[in-house]
Image (cartoon, helix red, strand yellow):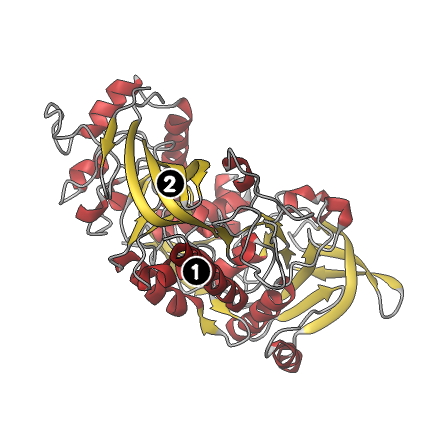
Amino acid sequence: MSMDVQKKNMNYDALVIGAGIAGGEAALNLANTGYKVLLVDKELSVGGKMIMLSKVFPTLDCAACITTPKVSEISRHPNITVFIGSEVGRINKLSENEFTAQVTRKPRYVHVEDCTACQLCEKACPVNVRDQYQFGLIGRKAAFIPFSICSPKAAAIDIDNCTLCGACERACPTNCIDFTMEPETLELHVKTIVIATGFNLFDPMNMPRYGYGQYKNVITALQMERELAPTRPFNTILRPGDGKVPDRLAYVLCVGSRDASVGNPICSQICCMYSIKQAQLLMGALPMADVTIYYINIRSFGKGFEEFYQQAKGMGVNFVKGKIGKISEKENGNLMLRYEDINEGKLKETEHDLVILSTGVLPNAGIDRLFENEKLSLDSFSFIGQSDMLASPAKTSIEGVFVAGTATGPMDIPDSILSAGAASSEAISYLIQHA
Amino acid sequence: MKDTETDIQDNTNPGSPLGARGEIEKGKTAKYLREKLGGISEQAKENLKEFNRIKKLMLDALGEEDLTVKQLTERLNMPSDEVVYYLMSLVKYGFVKTGDIDDMDEYYTYKLNK
């Protein structure tokens, strides 16, 4: 699509890249201290991955109940400008406290300030495509509100799948849909940068022996997270392969982590606990179901984690120490799991009707390539390198650029928020020193 | 690609020629983009046709009687995972609603939302 690109100059004290829980926390800390912050995220909502979760471990608090007040505070803060649906391009350090960064804002085709989220455009849109915010389990329209608690709560147009029929425009009572919008490139001047680009999850298609993508009743833990959430895609927990209510569920841990054969030898730190959390939620949602967790080691190292693990055992979750070698599918859609029972030293096969793959945490690659005249160092696993990991864990190899949350490596939500606190403190200190 | 330099402090929406140029009528901008792009992609057209075809088949079948995913799969001769995907989308859009579960507590029936 050929579009004109406008270039505008803007000045901020801090640029925070990534509006997940870590980026949001860092932005709030900076803004509350009086600094002017630009918060940029490529997604259509603030909140990152956390806003998509059902509950959090080990307290089983509602994730949305924690995230939405924070997201609302970010969106309304007078010192924070939020650019969602935007990507940061090349970054240059000009002097001690002066960086330039290009940000490209992709058109949403909706004037957010005029949209009332009435959903009449959604209703009018004739298109159906897989909903990325429900991880493909269900459809959405091309004119759509990303998800019910998104921020800003406004429609967006998926231009790649839109048929440009104009039905959404005709249905819109505020005339906020505007197909004349074009991409816009902004040239920013900032004094400091906080990188909070989060993590990616391992793509289980890279482990064909587990059958993800081929066997429809093999899903990822994030897909199960959506099935368990109040804003779930189905009326209850169902197998996506045939709509059956499952009653023999299996979790396979360490899919794409602690596995050098797929290039990720490190522990993802969160998979054991999010799987145990989901198992407990499933015991509540499907009281008659059997839930088995196949693990190598349960790593319950955090505050309250071991008690949470013991609680799951007490609820009847079955823990089997065994590495799954292969998953095969039966004619009825059930799945045969072949594994080594490590405690008994025997090869075994067990049948389940839904398999959930607890996929590992990978770095969100590419941010280092944006820095043109400075080198942003990465660690040996391609997470952002911490120049002084013990004394100043938020410092990177570039003075004035700080890192927060899982951009540095796998960690849980409380640790991400702590890390964001450290990054924002370092950034504030840098701004004061270089005022 | 055309570059224009402007100094601003803030801006909450990407640029738009709407109003500024004055020639595009508000509420009819889809036509503007369709003409600018010279039509829409074949994939978007095919996707819409396929959805409408499956939607009609499903609603016609459910118009005759309430059905489970398994029964719809047999009636429509479609893969069962695709039936789940399209059926659940129709539930979301309000065309279909969930009925009772069977005696084995395994499969729900689905019915038209009249």
- Viewer-nearest of labels 1 and 2? 1
Q: Residue at x 69, y 60 (%)?
A: A253
Residue A86: which numbered mark, if any?
A: 2
Find numbered disc 2 in the image and state the secondary structure of the residue it sits on: strand
Q: Is residue A330 left or right of residue A192?
A: right
Q: Residue at x 59, y 70 (%)?
A: A279
Q: Chain of mark 1?
A: A
Foreground pick, A42 / A7 = A7
Q: Which mark, by number, is residue A332?
A: none
Image-based side of B55 in relation to A400, left or right:
left
Crowding at mark 1 (Cα within 10 Å: few <14, some 14-19, many 20+): few
Total labels drawn: 2
Query: Which residue, given by chain and number where applicable, does mark 1 sit on?
Result: A429
> Is residue A234 at all visible to an observer of this figure?
no
Question: Picture quarter containing residue A85?
Answer: top left
Helix, strand or loop at label 1? It is helix
Question: What is the CA distance from the residue labelled 1 to the residue labelled 2?
Answer: 28 Å
Name which residue type carries label 1.
Answer: Ser
- Residue, x 55% and y 52% (percent of image)? A242
Where on the picture, by quarter, is residue A46?
bottom left
- Residue situated furthest top in the rendering: B38
In percent of width and height, residue B16 lies at 21, 31
Q: Is residue A165 left or right of residue A344?
A: left
Q: Report whether A359 appears left or right of A157.
A: right
Can you see residue A49? yes
* In the foreground, A376 or A300: A376
Subunit under mark 2: A
> Foreground residue, A383 or A403?
A403
Where residue A70 sits in the image (x, y, percent)? 35, 64
